[in-house]
């Protein structure tokens, strides 16, 4: 145990076998969504001849770079369906995996600073409640009671005039989620193959997939699920499919650790501040995306500064804290800011992408319905609306225009 | 923060003065009402999103306010070149030959000159 404690990447939790010559299914990308997909394929659908390939190490992309926020207070019915499916799975995930993912329903609060914010947030509260999702409206005094660090005085730079609160929202430990899924999938026979970059998708004369070319050689597969986040368009191009995706750097940062001062997650979309405190004591702060396409996993310093300006305005007590680390991840964004979880025009090829700036919260739900889609070769009712074809038919799930939510 | 050369103002300015305006060289259909759903999807939603060289539009919002195009590497974020709107899409092979522009780790005295010192005719002592 002491020896294990010295390693940051607990690779004793899963086996690291050499790849076989072929599998029933290959998942491209060993992030949270990919590992969850493999786990549910084995657990719910009896498919254990499965390999998860990753060009780096498991959970080393956006799974290790997000701000760990969980919530399901999305406006549209389709989004509410998939995000709340995930939230229901979060509750009980530690038991399902027999691994503590540290899901903490500490509440996600969104602040209103003006009349428009009040209207938008109340609309969300009502829409959510119609969908059976908990979300409630708080007065400034109630918000202060729930989150004492809030300054609700009327002469604040950005006065708090109300807030919405999803009590079931909260955080989980992102690394533990990846490790827990990897461990549970590996125990059911799934091969997790790291440092194995997919360089091509092989197809038969009839068009259907037959396997992948990788940096570790050619591997056969009857079905391929692409769950490659920022690199999804790169992988899909290998099968000749051009995607409605653009990849942007998204940054986050953490402060030095301090004693517990911040009890819940607070978002303020108007000033773009978005903050929680991890169990280690660090303030976890999410910044915005850069304006240009990039695969560099870095971003501009002015993006971080902009977010810290807002944090300091909202919470003056944090102005003297030191920021410890910042980093960037590459997020794949769709035109309507909703994900694509679907079959593709290529037989045997499935895609789960476009989670943009808010995929972590959906990890269990996404893996669960994507496994269904792969195993049955048809979408689960929950992910049926999230097709690629919606950009042709116009049946968009337009959270981008209507939600006004920070992801 | 990126340093971007505006081809109209003919100087490098900080990224904050600019707005990225998406992929370049996407032609709007001349009769959009007659466009099929497939073609509209390709025009409006599908993007190349390359890992490597991208052709993209920028607007010098807080400067001359004009749109122009740029060639940039999306892995290193280094610009290869910028050029005026309406100019033809540069030939990638020709770009490779001329080499990357000022951003390619050249010493300061070789920045923003048409021919880097290394390629200029050497001047012997006494000649100048």
Image (cartoon, helix red, strand yellow):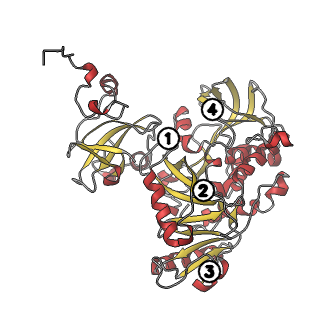
Q: CA distance from mark 4 to mark 1?
A: 29 Å
* Badge 3 element: helix
The answer to whether marks 4 and 1 sit on the same chain is yes
Q: Earlier in the sequence, mark 4 or mark 3?
A: 3
The answer to whether marks 4 and 3 sit on the same chain is yes
Q: Earlier in the sequence, mark 2 or mark 3?
A: 3
The answer to whether marks 1 and 2 sit on the same chain is yes
Q: Which residue is mark 3?
A: A143
**Residue A193 percent coordinates (x, y):** 72, 32
Q: Which residue is mark 2?
A: A254
Judging from the image, mark 1 belongs to the subunit labelled: A
Q: Residues within 10 Å of mark 3 (few under 14, many from 20)?
A: many
Q: Earlier in the sequence, mark 1 or mark 2?
A: 2
Q: Which residue is mark 4?
A: A208
Q: Earlier in the sequence, mark 1 or mark 3?
A: 3
**Residue A299 percent coordinates (x, y):** 47, 48
* Badge 4 element: loop
Closer to the eye: label 4 or 3: 3
Residue at image x 55%, y 33%? A239
Q: Which residue is mark 1?
A: A295
Closer to the eye: label 4 or 1: 1
Q: CA distance from mark 4 to mark 3?
A: 55 Å
Judging from the image, mark 3 belongs to the subunit labelled: A
Q: Residues within 10 Å of mark 1 (few under 14, many from 20)?
A: many
Where the N terminus of chain A falls, by quadrant?
Answer: top right
Q: CA distance from mark 2 to mark 4?
A: 45 Å
Q: Is residue A44 left or right of residue B73?
A: right
Q: Earlier in the sequence, mark 4 or mark 1?
A: 4
Residue at image x 63%, y 25%? A215
């Amino acid at each position: 145990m002491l020896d294990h404690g010295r390693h940051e990447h607990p690779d004793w939790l899963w086996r690291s076998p050499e790849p076989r010559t072929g599998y029933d299914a290959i998942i491209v990308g060993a992030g949270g969504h990919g590992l969850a997909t493999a786990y549910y394929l084995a657990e719910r659908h009896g498919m254990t001849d499965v390999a998860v390939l990753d060009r780096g190490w498991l959970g080393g992309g956006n799974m290790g770079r997000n701000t760990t926020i969980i919530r399901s207070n999305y406006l549209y019915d389709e989004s509410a369906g998939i995000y709340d499916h995930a939230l229901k799975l979060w509750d009980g995930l530690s038991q399902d995996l027999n691994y503590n993912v540290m899901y903490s329903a500490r509440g996600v609060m969104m602040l209103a600073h003006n009349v428009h914010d009040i209207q938008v947030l109340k609309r969300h509260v009502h829409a959510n409640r119609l969908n059976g999702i908990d979300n409630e409206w708080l007065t400034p005094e109630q918000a202060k009671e729930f989150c004492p660090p809030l300054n609700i005085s009327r002469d604040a730079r950005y006065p708090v005039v109300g807030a919405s609160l999803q009590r079931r929202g909260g955080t989980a430990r992102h690394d533990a989620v990846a490790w827990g899924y990897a461990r549970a999938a590996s125990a059911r026979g799934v091969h997790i193959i790291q440092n194995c970059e997919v360089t091509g998708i092989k197809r038969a004369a009839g068009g259907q997939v037959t396997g992948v070319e990788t940096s570790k050689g050619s591997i056969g597969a009857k079905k391929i699920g692409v769950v490659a986040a920022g690199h999804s368009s790169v992988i899909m191009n290998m099968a000749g499919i051009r995607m409605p995706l653009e990849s942007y750097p998204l940054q986050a940062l953490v402060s030095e650790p301090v004693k517990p001062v911040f009890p819940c997650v607070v978002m303020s979309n108007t000033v773009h501040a978005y903050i929680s405190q991890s169990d280690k004591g660090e303030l976890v702060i999410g910044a915005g995306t850069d304006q240009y396409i990039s695969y560099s996993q870095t971003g501009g310093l002015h993006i971080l500064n902009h977010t810290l300006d807002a944090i300091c305005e909202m919470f003056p007590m944090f102005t003297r804290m030191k920021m410890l680390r910042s980093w960037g991840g590459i997020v794949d964004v769709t035109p309507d800011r909703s994900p694509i979880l679907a079959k593709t025009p290529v037989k045997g090829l499935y895609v789960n992408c476009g989670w943009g700036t808010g995929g972590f919260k959906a990890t269990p739900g996404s893996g669960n319905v994507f496994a269904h889609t792969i195993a049955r070769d048809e979408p689960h009712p929950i992910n049926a609306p999230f097709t690629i074809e919606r950009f042709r038919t116009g049946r968009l799930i337009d959270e981008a225009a209507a939600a006004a939510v920070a992801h | 923060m990126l340093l971007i050369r505006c081809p109209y103002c003919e100087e490098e300015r900080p990224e904050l003065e600019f707005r990225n305006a998406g992929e370049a060289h996407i032609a709007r259909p001349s009769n959009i009402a007659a466009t099929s759903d497939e073609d509209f999807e390709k025009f409006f939603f599908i993007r190349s999103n390359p890992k490597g060289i991208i052709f993209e539009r920028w607007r010098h919002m807080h400067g001359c306010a004009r749109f122009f195009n740029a060639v940039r590497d999306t892995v290193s974020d280094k610009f290869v070149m910028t050029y005026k709107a309406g100019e033809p899409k540069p030939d990638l092979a020709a770009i490779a030959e001329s080499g990357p522009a000022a951003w390619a780790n050249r010493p300061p005295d070789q920045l923003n000159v048409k021919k880097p010192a290394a390629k200029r005719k050497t001047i012997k002592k006494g000649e100048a």
